[in-house]
Image (cartoon, helix red, strand yellow):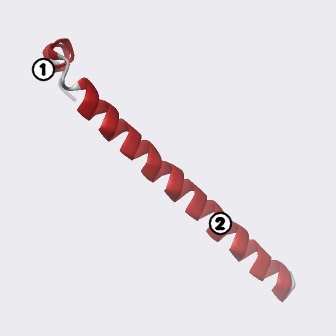
Amino acid sequence: MSNHEHWVGMCVEQAQEMYVRRWSSLGALVIILWDFIVSWNSEYKYIWRYVKL
């Protein structure tokens, strides 16, 4: 493997890691916001009161 191929491979790996990290953070934010919005619904609270995670 040449030095250039090694450098390109590292850049691709870093780009993939940044992409995954960005979408993972966005997914977590969406879940938190959804939970916050739905938590105003009393039926939602009643259902999840008995669920043990």
Q: Residue at x 72, y 68 (%)?
A: 12
> Is 6 above or below relative to 31?
below
Asked whether 41 or 47 is in front, the reply is 41
Please tell me which of labels 1 and 2 falls first in the chain.
Answer: 2
> Is 8 above or below relative to 36?
below
**Image quadrant in which you'd find residue 41:** top left
Q: Quadrant of the N terminus?
A: bottom right
> Is 17 above or below relative to 49?
below
**Image quadrant in which you'd find residue 11:** bottom right
Residue 50 pos. (x, y %): 13, 17
Query: Disc number at residue 10?
Result: none
Residue 16 pos. (x, y %): 64, 61
Residue 26 pos. (x, y %): 45, 48
Amino acid at dot 1: Arg
Q: Report the side of 48 relative to 32 (left or right).
A: left
Asked whether 45 or 40 is in front, the reply is 40
Kind of element beneath mark 1: loop
Q: Residue at x 36, y 37 (%)?
A: 31
Q: Report the side of 29 relative to 39 (left or right).
A: right
In this view, the residue farthest toward the right is 2
- Residue wearing tag 2: 15
For label 1, the crowd category at 10 Å Cα-Cα, with few meaning under 14, some 14 to 19 and many 20 or more, is few
Asked whether 16 or 1 is in front, the reply is 16
Query: Disc number at residue 49?
Result: 1
Q: Residue at x 27, y 29 (%)?
A: 37
Amino acid at dot 2: Ala
Q: Quadrant of the C terminus?
A: top left
Kind of element beneath mark 2: helix
Asked if labels 2 and 1 touch by Cβ distance under 8 angstroms, the answer is: no
Residue 4 pos. (x, y %): 84, 84
